[in-house]
Image: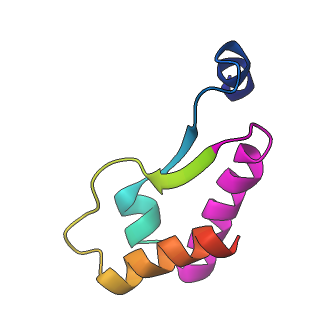
């Protein structure tokens, strides 16, 4: 489905890889979060323009350190 959307838009869009703010960003271990981001980035690289992001607002119990880890993993990978 993603490749179809990308092709139909002629590469004029940036695709978003949404992670679940609670189940993935807040609760997963560091290694699991890194793997979830890697999986999305690997898929996104096939289509060109891609951003990894949260699917909804972050939850109140998500620490600033965890958000920093999320951003750092996306940049590193």
The part of the image, by quadrant, that contains residue 66 is: bottom left
Does the magenta segment cover residue 16? no
Q: Is residue 69 left or right of residue 15?
A: left
Q: Is residue 68 left or right of residue 49?
A: left
**Count of numbered circles on the image:** 0
- 7 up-or-down from 20: above or below: above
Residue extending furthest toward the right:
46
- 30 up-or-down from 17: above or below: below
The part of the image, by quadrant, that contains residue 2 is: top right
Which residue shows up at 50% across the image and 72% down it?
Answer: 71
Residue extending furthest toward the bottom:
65
Q: Residue 64 at what x, y percent from top left?
A: 31, 82
Which residue shows up at 71% across the image and 70% down it?
Answer: 77
The part of the image, by quadrant, that contains residue 41 is: bottom right
Q: Which residues are magenta?
A: 29-49
State the residue in front, 58 or 8. 8
- 51 up-or-down from 29: above or below: above
């Amino acid at each position: 489905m993603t490749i179809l959307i990308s092709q139909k838009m002629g590469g004029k869009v940036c695709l978003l890889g949404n992670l679940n703010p609670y189940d993935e960003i807040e609760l997963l271990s560091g290694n699991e979060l890194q793997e979830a981001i890697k999986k999305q980035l690997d898929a996104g690289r096939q289509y060109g323009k891609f951003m990894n992001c949260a699917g909804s607002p972050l939850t109140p119990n998500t620490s600033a350190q965890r958000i920093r880890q999320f951003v750092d993993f996306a940049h590193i990978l």
